[in-house]
């Protein structure tokens, strides 16, 4: 589970592929997160910068190419240096949107 709230996305498709992707979170404050706030996760940049890197990767490579471990961290060599936050909820939300499209 990501530390920054319930993800919401804006997504568009063209020819069965993701064309536009914007990931949002209902952000919790550092005070609300308490011990769950993990500034160490920001080694690759701010939350916004890391989510932008994830969005760009998904658009270029597809959601199926995003590999996430049990801790919710990406394991792709070409992505894990720019995304160090927990992305499991974001990946799940995008996967769910793709599944709806493919019905």
Image (spheres, rainbow, N blue to C red):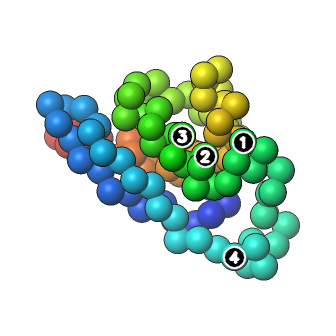
Q: What is the CA distance from the residue labelled 3 to the residue labelled 4?
A: 22 Å
Q: What is the CA distance from the residue labelled 2 to the residue labelled 3?
A: 5 Å
Element assignment for label 3: helix
* Of the image marks 1 and 3, the number of the one nearer the N terminus: 1
Q: Position of residue 54 (x, y in %)?
A: 52, 40
Q: Which residue appears at 69% of the width and 76% of the height? A: 29
**10 lies left or right of 73:** left
- Classify 57 as above or below 3: above
Q: What is the CA distance from the residue labelled 4 to the residue labelled 2?
A: 18 Å
The C terminus, quarter of image? top left
Q: Which residue appears at 47% of the width and 61% of the height? A: 24
- Disc 4 or disc 2, which is closer to the eye? 2
Give the residue pinned by disc 3.
Answer: 53
- Residue 44 - label: 1
* Of the image marks 4 and 2, the number of the one nearer the N terminus: 4
State yes or no: discs 1 and 3 in contact (Cβ < 8 Å).
yes
**36 lies left or right of 2:** right
State yes or no: discs 1 and 2 in contact (Cβ < 8 Å).
yes
The N terminus, quarter of image? bottom right
- Disc 1 or disc 4, which is closer to the eye? 1
Give the residue pinned by disc 4.
Answer: 29
State yes or no: discs 2 and 3 in contact (Cβ < 8 Å).
yes
| 10 Å crowding of disc 3: few (<14), some (14-19), many (20+) | some
Give the residue pinned by disc 2.
Answer: 50
| 10 Å crowding of disc 4: few (<14), some (14-19), many (20+) | few
State yes or no: discs 4 and 2 in contact (Cβ < 8 Å).
no
State yes or no: discs 1 and 4 in contact (Cβ < 8 Å).
no
| 10 Å crowding of disc 2: few (<14), some (14-19), many (20+) | many
Q: What is the CA distance from the residue labelled 1 to the residue labelled 2?
A: 7 Å
Q: Position of residue 36 (x, y in %)?
A: 78, 63
């Amino acid at each position: 589970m990501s530390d920054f709230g319930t993800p919401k996305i804006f997504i568009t498709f063209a020819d069965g592929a993701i064309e536009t992707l914007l990931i949002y979170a209902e952000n919790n404050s550092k005070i609300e997160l308490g011990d769950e706030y993990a500034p160490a996760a920001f080694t690759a940049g701010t939350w916004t910068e890391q989510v932008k890197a994830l969005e760009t990767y998904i658009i270029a490579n597809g959601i199926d190419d995003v590999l996430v471990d049990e801790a919710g961290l990406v394991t792709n060599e070409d992505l894990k240096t720019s995304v160090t936050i927990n992305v499991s909820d974001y990946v799940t939300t995008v996967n769910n949107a793709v599944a709806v499209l493919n019905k």
